[in-house]
């Protein structure tokens, strides 16, 4: 975990496009800001700037972004999409020693998708004198070691159950790596366009403690063609709705 100077959090490096996760430092807590409606990326970025300024927080306090896409992208299209996003973080001076400290979830809704890539929500830190510990993370998919896809091309009930089992296990490990457990999470968000028989029973077994607060199911898919399922969790001080 690497401290983000001026940000009020530590982050788990993940790659040039997004971090593995972030944990608020003592004296700070993470807030989740949900837009009242999706905004195209440029107006959305401007809203993030205004909101953090109004909250008295620097851009370096930004630790999470959630985006929505019109459709799934090919690997080449995904690389092209990421370039201006990372450039925006660079212009905000958010990157730290060439590392990206901002977690990200990027989803293509199966219905009602935006016409262009849009901002759904973002997370940032605020000063906090209490003892609650907070975290956020990037969404995780069924892409396994070496880039292989678990149950590739199989969206049958059996295939989706295999995918879910793998992803819940991966998220469980990530949460532990951040120093938390499932029952610390205030939000669990599942993204899939295919209903999975027994999904919640399976999560009750694998992700013990996740279900009492419920699970948000978003009917959509991960950003890259070939992937069917994404999962994330977070513990936040509060969730606020930002007028867009």
Image: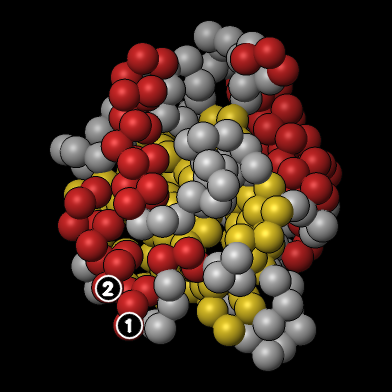
Residue sitting at 58 percent across and 84 percent down? Answer: 127
- Give the total of numbered labels: 2
- Residue 76 location (% of width, % of height): 36, 14
Decide if residue 48 is in sight here: yes
| Direction from residue 199 to residue 92 in the image, left or right | left
- Residue 167 location (% of width, % of height): 68, 32
| Direction from residue 158 to residue 239 in the image, left or right | left
Q: State the residue lying farthest toward the bottom.
A: 129
Residue sitting at 47 percent across and 15 percent down? Answer: 226
Q: Which mark is residue 54?
A: 1
Q: Residues within 10 Å of mark 1 (few under 14, many from 20)?
A: few
Residue sitting at 68 percent across and 20 percent down? Answer: 144
- Residue 153 location (% of width, % of height): 53, 9
What residue is pinned by disc 2?
50
The C terminus - image quarter: bottom left
Helix, strand or loop at label 2? It is: helix
Structural distance between the alpha carbons of marks 1 and 2: 6 Å
Q: Are marks 1 and 2 in contact (CB under 8 Å)?
A: yes
Image vertical order of residue 73 relative to residue 129, above or below: above
């Amino acid at each position: 975990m690497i401290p983000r100077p001026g940000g009020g959090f530590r982050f788990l490096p993940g790659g040039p496009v997004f971090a593995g996760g972030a944990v608020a430092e003592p004296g700070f807590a993470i807030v989740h800001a949900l837009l009242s409606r999706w905004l195209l990326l440029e107006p959305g970025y401007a809203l993030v700037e205004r909101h953090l300024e109004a909250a008295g927080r620097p851009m370096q306090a930004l630790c999470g972004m959630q985006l929505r896409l019109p459709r799934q992208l090919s690997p080449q299209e995904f690389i092209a999409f990421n370039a201006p996003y990372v450039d925006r973080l660079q212009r905000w001076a958010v990157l730290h020693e060439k590392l990206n400290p901002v977690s990200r979830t990027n989803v293509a809704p199966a219905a009602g998708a935006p016409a262009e890539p849009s901002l759904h929500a973002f997370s940032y830190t605020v000063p906090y004198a209490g003892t609650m510990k907070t975290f956020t993370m990037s969404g995780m998919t069924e892409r396994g070691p070496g880039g292989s896809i678990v149950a590739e091309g199989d969206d049958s009930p059996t295939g989706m159950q295999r995918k879910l089992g793998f992803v819940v296990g991966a998220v469980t490990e990530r949460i532990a790596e951040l120093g938390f457990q499932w029952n610390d999470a205030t939000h669990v968000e599942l993204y899939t366009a295919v209903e999975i028989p027994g999904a919640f029973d399976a999560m009750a077994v694998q992700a013990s403690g996740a279900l009492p607060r419920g699970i948000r199911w978003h009917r959509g898919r991960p950003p890259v063609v070939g992937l069917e399922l994404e999962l994330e969790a977070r513990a936040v001080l509060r969730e606020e709705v930002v007028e867009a």
